Image (tube, rainbow, N blue to C red):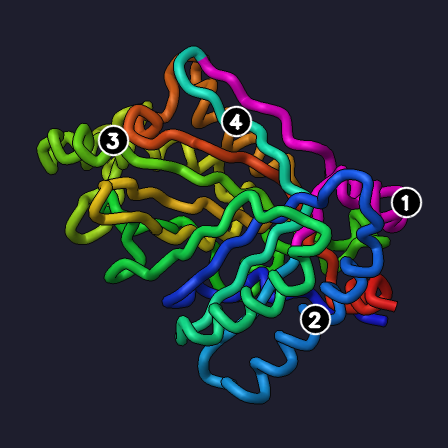
């Protein structure tokens, strides 16, 4: 059977709900997980029929420890491990627990709500929700920092090449590695910078999203360190979120990749720096509160899990 990948290469939608669930200790969880797999397949099929223009989807990722607890196939996907912190001279990409990740998106927020409600109904008896983040598209795909986010994303057939596992791991062909981080921004400090200084942090113009020339761009700018080469791309679907009244605003970073080593290379570049100590300046204004890796099996594998 040709692997039928989950919707990891879809483009950013207007509304998103991100859910991270952790199984409760000393409970039998396999039956509920089987039901969840069946539900995810059903939600995607139903959305395609009922809302064909909404670009609605639900993507399920499974963490390393959950994979083992659930007795899923061995050997595991080649690069599926528990994420280890990346510690630089000033900032750390923290590692946090995550057994399951649900990435729900649609043009219509009502679809996201109903999908999340159905998923929660199945998981609440056996798991605790560690994160629930409601993301939204901000203008022309800008982060709350005011700059366009995801300009370096691959397009067309390149999205599948960089996001989906190929023949190098045939047992898991059609799957994808998923890495997420919840960043909180210090907007007061960020807004204290002039537009020119903000552009030096990002390495791009704020208004028109034009990348600075290499001889002008600071070596510690975000675009200089987060982009680790044309042969090492990921598919991002970052979304802003937050509470305006408390000024608790952030970005939910989400990356799909055919190899986790690509994500690791990017994190090392940002947090440790090139050379070491020359870290990504955006981290002075954006703090990673979570960091978790998952594997996204293709639909045909979810179908096997559901039986």
- The picture places residue 15, in percent across and down from the top left corner, at 40, 65
The residue labelled by disc 2 is 39
- Depth-wise, is mark 4 or mark 2 nearer the camera? 2
Q: Magenta span: helix, strand or loop, mainly?
A: loop
Determine whether, in the image, residue 160 is placed left or right of residue 252: right
Task: Determine which of the numbered discs, if any, sits on residue 74 in the image.
Answer: 1
User: At 48% across and 69% down in the image, what residue appears?
Assistant: 112
Query: At numbered mark 1, what does the secondary structure look like: helix, strand or loop?
Result: loop
Sequence order check, earlier mark of 3 and 1: 1
Q: Residues within 10 Å of mark 2 (few under 14, many from 20)?
A: some
Using the numbered discs, state the Cα–Cα distance from disc 3 to disc 1 in whole angstroms. Answer: 44 Å
Foreground disc of the pair 3, 1: 1
Quadrant, the N terminus? bottom right
Q: CA distance from mark 4 to mark 1?
A: 28 Å
Distance in Å between CA atoms under marks 3 and 4: 22 Å
Residue 173 drawn above or below residue 25: below
- Of residues 50 and 86, the one nearer the viewer is 50
Residue 3, visible in the rendered structure? no
Q: Would you identify the image quadrant in which residue 96 lies?
A: top right
**Mark 1 crowdedness (10 Å alpha carbons): few <14, some 14-19, many ≥20:** few
């Amino acid at each position: 059977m040709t692997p039928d990948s989950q919707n990891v290469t879809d483009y950013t939608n207007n509304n998103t709900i991100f859910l991270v669930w952790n199984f409760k200790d000393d409970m039998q969880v396999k039956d509920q997980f089987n039901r969840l797999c069946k539900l995810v397949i059903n939600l995607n099929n139903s959305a395609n029929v009922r809302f064909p223009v909404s670009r609605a989807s639900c993507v399920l990722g499974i963490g390393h420890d959950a994979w083992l607890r659930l007795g899923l196939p061995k050997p595991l996907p080649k690069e599926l491990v528990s994420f280890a912190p990346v510690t630089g001279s000033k900032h750390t990409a923290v590692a946090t627990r995550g057994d399951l990740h649900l990435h729900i998106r649609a043009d219509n927020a009502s679809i996201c709500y109903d999908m999340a409600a159905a998923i929660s109904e199945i998981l609440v008896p056996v798991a605790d929700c560690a994160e629930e983040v409601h993301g939204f598209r901000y203008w022309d795909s800008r982060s709350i920092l005011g700059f366009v986010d995801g300009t370096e994303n691959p397009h067309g057939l390149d999205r599948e090449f960089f996001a989906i596992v190929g023949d190098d791991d045939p047992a898991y062909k059609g799957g994808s590695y998923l890495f997420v981080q919840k960043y909180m921004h210090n907007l007061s400090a960020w807004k204290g910078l002039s537009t020119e200084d903000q552009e030096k942090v990002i390495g791009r113009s704020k208004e028109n999203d034009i990348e600075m020339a290499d001889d002008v761009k600071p070596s510690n700018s975000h675009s200089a360190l987060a982009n680790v080469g044309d042969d090492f791309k990921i598919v991002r679907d970052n979304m802003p979120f937050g509470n305006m009244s408390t000024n608790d605003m952030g970005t939910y970073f989400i990356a799909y990749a055919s190899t986790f080593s690509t994500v690791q290379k990017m994190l090392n570049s940002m947090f440790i720096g090139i050379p070491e100590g020359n870290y990504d300046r955006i981290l002075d204004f954006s703090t990673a509160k979570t960091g978790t890796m998952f594997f996204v099996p293709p639909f045909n594998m979810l179908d096997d899990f559901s039986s």
